[in-house]
Image: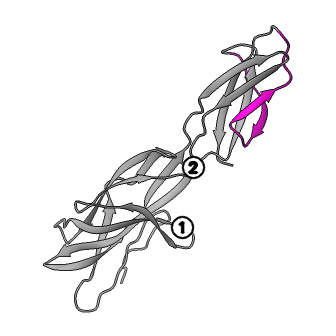
Amino acid sequence: HVSDPVKTGQVLYAGACDGAWDLLYSYFDKDSIPTTAGKSFSIKLTADDWGAAPVPTSGTIATVDKETGKMTEMTAKTDNSGNAEVVMDNAGEFYLSANGKAESYGSPTSLAGALTKVTVGLDKTKITKAKAKGKKAVLKWKKVTGAKNYEIYRSNKKNGRYKKLKTVKKTSYTDKKVKKGKKYFYKVRAIDD
């Protein structure tokens, strides 16, 4: 029974039990996490047992589809202290929750977790080779985890205005519109679309 109206933007947690509680509210130590695709971040899972804080065990971390509520289990799992190292391979906005067990009043109890928002960006692209070949400039760079394409930009000045030349899927590009003896500066940006 909810006596106060819920306002737009508020989160409401509700549950029901028959006789004894068999489900504990759990949460991560961070509400939101900014990270980079392919890099790990640490997260800790805790459960609330009416003021006491039991240590979760057997915790499985999952991504949650915010529209449907469908949970997709990840390979990341918590250790016996509720700690986990998580790696997100794709850029975007994700929501994490957890399933698991905790000890409550001497009995194993299931966990139901709140959502933690994870915003995953892409790492900077590092050009590994830039070589002039007559009227061509050949660029190569390292693959960026989570990148689907790369945008190539060129300028006549290092700190000048860069013009977008092309979007490519590969980790190389040949600029065929250069003038022999002229200096050019390039930037490559990884994108996830």
Residue 91 is tagged as 2
Instruction: Using the image, determine if residue 157 lies above or below residue 168.
Output: above
Q: Position of residue 154 (x, y in %)?
A: 75, 23
Magenta stretch? Answer: 160-180
Residue pushed farthest bottom? Answer: 19
Amino acid carrying label 2: it is Ala
Q: Does residue 179 show up magenta in the picture? A: yes
User: Judging from the image, what secondary structure is the residue with disc 1 in?
Assistant: loop
Q: Earlier in the sequence, mark 2 or mark 1?
A: 1
Residue pushed farthest front? Answer: 133
Residue appearing at x 23%, y 63% in the figure: 80
Q: Which residue is mark 1?
A: 65
Amino acid carrying label 1: it is Asp
Q: Quadrant of residue 173?
A: top right
Decide if residue 50 is on the left or right side of residue 91: left
Q: Nearer the viewer, residue 49 or 56?
A: 56
Residue pushed farthest top? Answer: 181
In which quadrant is the N terminus drawn?
Answer: bottom left
Q: Does residue 119 show up magenta in the picture? A: no
Q: Quadrant of residue 68?
A: bottom right
Q: Nearer the viewer, residue 182 or 18?
A: 182
